[in-house]
Amino acid sequence: MPADIDRLTTFIHDVPDFPKPGITFKDFTPLLADAAALALAVELMANPFRGKRIDLVVGAESRGFIFGTAIAQSLSAGFVPVRKPGKLPRTVHGVDYLLEYGTDRLEIHSDAVDRSQRVLLVDDLLATGGTLRACAELVQKTGATIVGLTVLIELEGLQGRRRVDEFGTVHSVIRC
């Protein structure tokens, strides 16, 4: 597996001072353009959750949508988007949260997840843990069971795992 991870890292570019000075953005869009790399990333993110009876994959706007829908298909599960405010047309649950570089709010349709369902949370990157924690809190409001969380990239130095490990298995493909 280290060779697979090494292969994926060649598609990820650091962009300094984006979106703000002092932040190094991990641009994985070249990975998305390569069919084999994209398939490998999805498989490596999904594999630890095979056989765990995942009913729904919940992905955070917007880059969590990219991997979330592919992982949902790979696990034969449905997909539910978590959106920024004002993007969902029906009644929502919402939660405010801290980002690495500010604050934001996320929302989910209040009827999108049933309490009997088993959920996998997906995002592209785990930094401070704010986004995934907000997603977990939204799913908890529905009463569903969170089985785990999976991300392509984890920025270990920011210790975001500490903020989300109470919600189940935390899996990251690339740690830097």
Image (cartoon, rainbow, N blue to C red):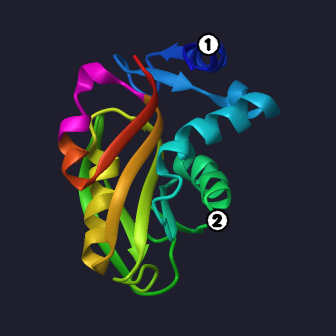
Is residue 21 a member of the stretch shown in magenta? Answer: no
Q: Residue at x 72, y 28 (%)?
A: 37
- Quarter holding the N terminus? top right
Vertical relation: 65 (above or below) 37:
below
Q: Alpha-carbon neighbours of circle 1 within 10 Å: few (<14), some, or many (≥20)?
A: few
- Quarter holding the C terminus? top left
Q: Residue at x 50, y 68 (%)?
A: 56
> Which label sits on residue 76?
2
Q: Are marks 1 and 2 in contact (CB under 8 Å)?
A: no
Label 1, on which residue? 3
In this image, 71 relative to 175: left or right? Answer: right
Vertical relation: 169 (above or below) 106:
above
Amino acid tagged 2: Ser
Res 65 quadrant in image: bottom right
x%, y% of residue 142?
31, 79
Instruction: State the SS at label 1.
Output: helix
